[in-house]
């Protein structure tokens, strides 16, 4: 690149001699000032196709410079549209979205119906951080159906990321109307409809796509709220895994395991940050018995600077950041560290790096806490649970096989939260009302559960239902359904999202937590009980429909466990209308029930470790050394 240009300059329009000069000098040279005008005229005199061929043979930087030189003289010519487009592609490849935006706009000025340029312009604008302009660029395009489908998908993705669920759902459905057979789009649309409480969520009204076929592609998270059958949940998860997680070619770990003085536990997560999982697991990491265990953390989490992230990392004996490693490289590192037990804390949730597990880098691999349902990866040995969440009669419906922790499956943090002062008046709640609440995400709601809630509130005079304000679409829809049930609008109260400490403090203002089913509250249910708030749950068949039952059984409140919708409604109404019963439940929780049971982190750590040791012993025994 720094060699002087050959004295034998090409004549304008002589593409062969331009190419020869380029090849002889290893690319576009630093041309001496006296000679550069000749080279410039030679490039500018090329016809478009010779220019394109020369650019294709050059590296991205040299090709971009060729186009720049040519366009400086020919940029307004009708044929320049293709050159501007190609220059935009090159500028994006070189990491310069600003210049790419200029190039794509020049191309569109010459040919407004060039849909490819509109699509790429939107991508460049998004890369430059201007999502609104990207959306406008994509909407302005009028491409053929195949490209229009891409545009709808791009629009849907960005809108969903922005939290604009309703507009995202419109775009995703428009894409399916062009090509129904898009499992990923079906998945995102169903979950968007769950979040908006657009029921039934799996009814997409797309010709050629049956409701049953769409439901099968709902994805792992939506499946927990859509099905109460672990086999149906597993089928949805298996389809998703088949699309997303290839088999890379393990196993890496020796079948006979290792011989270590202390068992090496590796925790794999993308949520070692301000995430519910970290709040639950921090004390377990701190309380592992270091005389018997070493604790490693394989961390692909965002560096959010939070106190909880700092606490989690401090609790690890070895912290191994894997942000910059491929899945294969991370798996090789875990194998090199000779981890005995690898515990995946993501499961099938956002950000999961399941391909690491597919390499089988540890002799024993288990999934825990992040995803409360089947994770049908052949390389997983266990799903950590308890006798309530997966009773023996349901064991055959699960893969991986259940490994039960004695007592409740859920880790908790006994550290007292710093609770701010809160009041009903400040939160917009009537002082004398009986307050039913649920602060779970609205995607966990179902039409049957909503109808039960309406009947419960209707049966309890001077009661209100206090919900989280999850998104504008669900708020509007639920308010309309509330009115259809004949309930006064002031009896439905929405609360904004707040920081974790205030959220916990607010729970104590309510009188009874109404759980969702078949996807129960987990962390939130534990928080409610900790704050002295009784809870009623509808126990189902799947793990996700039995989480709250496990928590209630642990704290000694079986009165909150219902086994049918009618039983659920009856129990909720009875607790709300029987002051003595309500007072007894509150007193039980106020007497330290949570601290003695779910909050006994030291005891939980011992039970958790015992389960891991049983699981390790249940695999192929270590070969003689």
Image (cartoon, grey):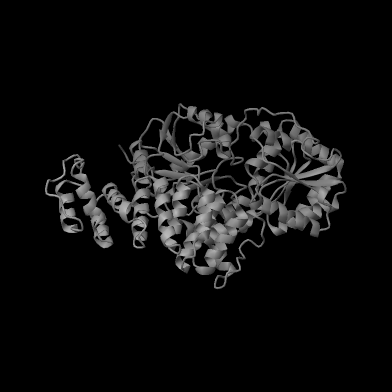
Q: Is residue 398 left or right of residue 252?
A: right
Q: Which is more toward the observer, 40 or 86? A: 40
Where residue 11 sits in the image (x, y, percent)?
A: 17, 55
Classify residue 473 by image quadrant. bottom right
Q: Which is more toward the observer, 468 or 617? A: 468
Classify residue 254 by image quadrant. top left
Question: Can the viewer see residue 20 in this picture?
Answer: yes
Relative to residue 223, is residue 553 depicted above or below?
A: above
Where residue 557 sits in the image (x, y, percent)?
A: 73, 41
How many tags in the picture?
A: 0
Question: Can the viewer see residue 225 in this picture?
Answer: no
Q: Is residue 508 left or right of residue 409?
A: right
Relative to residue 199, is residue 586 depicted above or below?
A: above
Relative to residue 180, is residue 342 depicted above or below?
A: above
| Residue at left offset 21%, top offset 53% | 42
**Residue lying farthest left?**
8
Where residue 242 sits in the image (x, y, percent)?
A: 44, 59
Classify residue 450 by image quadrant. bottom right
- On the rendered image, what quadrant is the C terminus found in? top left
- On the rendered image, what quadrant is the N terminus found in? top left
| Residue at left offset 50%, top offset 42% | 345
Q: Which is more toward the observer, 577 or 603? A: 577
Q: Is residue 287 left or right of residue 342?
A: right
Where residue 74 sits in the image (x, y, percent)?
A: 32, 56
Q: Which is more toward the observer, 474 or 301? A: 474
């Amino acid at each position: 690149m720094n060699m002087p240009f050959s004295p034998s300059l090409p004549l304008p329009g002589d593409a062969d001699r331009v190419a020869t000069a380029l090849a002889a000098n290893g690319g576009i040279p630093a041309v001496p000032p006296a000679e550069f005008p000749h080279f410039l005229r030679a490039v500018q005199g090329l016809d478009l196709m010779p220019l394109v061929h020369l650019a294709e043979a050059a590296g991205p930087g040299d090709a971009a410079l060729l186009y720049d030189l040519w366009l400086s003289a020919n940029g307004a010519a009708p044929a320049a549209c293709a050159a501007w487009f190609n220059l935009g592609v090159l500028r994006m490849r070189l990491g310069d979205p600003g210049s790419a935006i200029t190039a794509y706009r020049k191309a569109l000025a010459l040919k407004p119906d060039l849909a490819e340029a509109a699509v790429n312009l939107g991508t460049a604008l998004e890369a430059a951080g201007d999502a609104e302009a990207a959306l406008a660029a994509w909407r302005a395009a009028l491409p053929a159906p195949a490209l229009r489908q891409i545009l709808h998908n791009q629009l849907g993705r960005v809108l969903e990321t922005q939290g604009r669920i309703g507009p995202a759902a419109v775009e995703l459905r428009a894409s399916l109307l062009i090509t129904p057979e898009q499992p990923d789009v079906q998945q995102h649309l169903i979950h968007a409809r769950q979040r908006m409480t657009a029921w039934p969520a799996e009814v997409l009204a797309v010709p050629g796509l049956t409701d049953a076929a769409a439901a099968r592609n709902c994805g792992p998270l939506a499946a927990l709220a859509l099905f109460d059958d672990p086999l149906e949940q597993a089928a949805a998860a298996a389809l998703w895994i088949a699309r997303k997680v290839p088999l890379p070619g393990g196993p890496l770990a020796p079948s006979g395991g290792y011989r270590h003085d202390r068992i090496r536990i590796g925790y794999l997560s993308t949520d070692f940050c301000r995430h519910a999982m970290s709040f639950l697991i921090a004390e377990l990491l701190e309380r592992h018995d270091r005389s018997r265990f070493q604790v490693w953390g394989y961390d692909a989490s965002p560096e959010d600077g939070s106190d909880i992230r700092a606490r989690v990392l401090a609790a690890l004996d070895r912290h191994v950041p894997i942000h910059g490693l491929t899945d294969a490289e991370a798996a090789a590192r875990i194998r090199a560290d000779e981890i005995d037990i690898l515990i995946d804390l993501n499961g099938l949730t956002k950000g999961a790096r399941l391909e690491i597990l597919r390499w089988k880098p540890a002799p024993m691999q288990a999934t825990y806490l992040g995803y409360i349902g089947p994770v049908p990866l052949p390389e997983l040995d266990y799903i950590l649970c308890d006798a309530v969440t997966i009773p023996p009669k349901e064991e055959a419906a699960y893969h991986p096989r259940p490994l039960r922790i004695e007592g409740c499956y859920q880790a908790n943090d006994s550290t007292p939260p710093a609770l701010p002062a809160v009041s009903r008046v400040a939160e917009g709640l009537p002082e004398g009302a009986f307050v039913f609440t649920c602060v779970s995400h609205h995607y966990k709601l179902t039409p049957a559960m909503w109808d039960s809630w309406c009947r419960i509130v209707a049966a309890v005079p001077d009661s209100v239902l206090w919900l989280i304000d999850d998104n504008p679409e669900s708020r509007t829809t639920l308010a309309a359904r509330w009115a259809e049930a004949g309930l006064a609008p002031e009896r439905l109260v929405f609360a904004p999202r707040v920081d974790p400490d205030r959220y916990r403090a607010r729970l104590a203002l309510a009188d009874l937590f109404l759980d969702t089913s078949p996807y129960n509250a987990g962390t939130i249910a534990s928080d409610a009980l900790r704050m002295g708030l009784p809870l009623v749950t509808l126990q189902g068949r799947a793990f996700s429909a039995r989480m709250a039952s496990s928590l209630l059984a642990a704290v000694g409140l079986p009165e909150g466990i219902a086994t049918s919708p009618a039983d659920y409604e009856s129990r909720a109404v009875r607790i709300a209308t029987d002051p003595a019963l309500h007072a007894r439940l509150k007193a039980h929780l106020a007497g330290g029930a949570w601290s003695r049971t779910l909050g006994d982190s030291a005891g939980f750590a011992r039970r958790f470790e015992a389960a891991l040791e049983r699981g390790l012993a249940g695999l192929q025994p270590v070969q003689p050394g």
